[in-house]
Image (cartoon, helix red, strand yellow):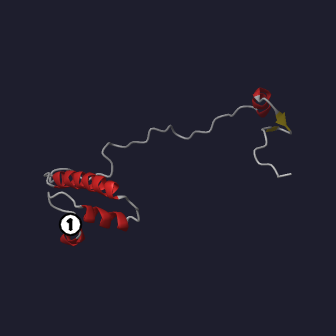
Amino acid sequence: MSAGLDQPAERAGLTGSAALTSEVAAYVARLARIELSAGELDRFAKQLGAVLEHASQVNALDTGDVEPTAHPLPLRNVLRKDEPRPSLERDAVLAEAPASEDGCFKVPRILAEER
């Protein structure tokens, strides 16, 4: 991380190994526009502290030899080629439908006008 990104976190007390206080949890909750009770603030402070502690452990890892990626797994296209082929005959498909009308599937009405 660059020094510019670390400064707001340091000012808010969100760095280091010290446990987060309820005041810091209240500050973060206010920024997120989340209303929490006193008990929830204590629990949130512990949870947020654990997340930040884990993030600091990950940040301490030597990743110099690791190639940057956007996804942890290699991605490849598993879709088949789009090749045109004959489709089913309309009459054969409509013959399998529970109901049809004028060459279309007939389905129950889901939107109706109020009476």
Identity of the residue drawn at 21% across and 50% down: 54
Residue to which mark 1 is pinned: 13
Between 73 and 45, the one nearer to me in the picture: 45
Secondary structure beneath dot 1 equals: loop
Query: Left or right of 112: which side holds 37?
Result: left
Image location (x, y in percent) of residue 3: 18, 70
Query: Left or right of 55: which side holds 41?
Result: right
Image location (x, y in percent) of residue 111: 77, 48
In the rendered image, which quarter contains the N terminus?
A: bottom left
Which quarter of the picture shows residue 20? Answer: bottom left
Query: Left or right of 48: which side holds 62?
Result: left
* Position above or below: 55 against 106: below
Identity of the residue drawn at 32% across and 42% down: 73
Dot 1 crowding, Cα within 10 Å, few <14, some 14–19, many 20+: some
Q: Identify which amino acid the numbered label 1 is placed on.
A: Gly
Between 103 and 4, the one nearer to me in the picture: 4
Between 28 and 112, the one nearer to me in the picture: 28
* Position above or below: 69 against 14: above
Image location (x, y in percent) of residue 81: 52, 39
Image location (x, y in percent) of residue 59: 18, 55
Which quarter of the picture shows residue 16? Answer: bottom left
Determine the residue located farthest toward the front in the rendered image.
38
Identity of the residue drawn at 78% across and 31% down: 94
* Position above or below: 80 against 92: below
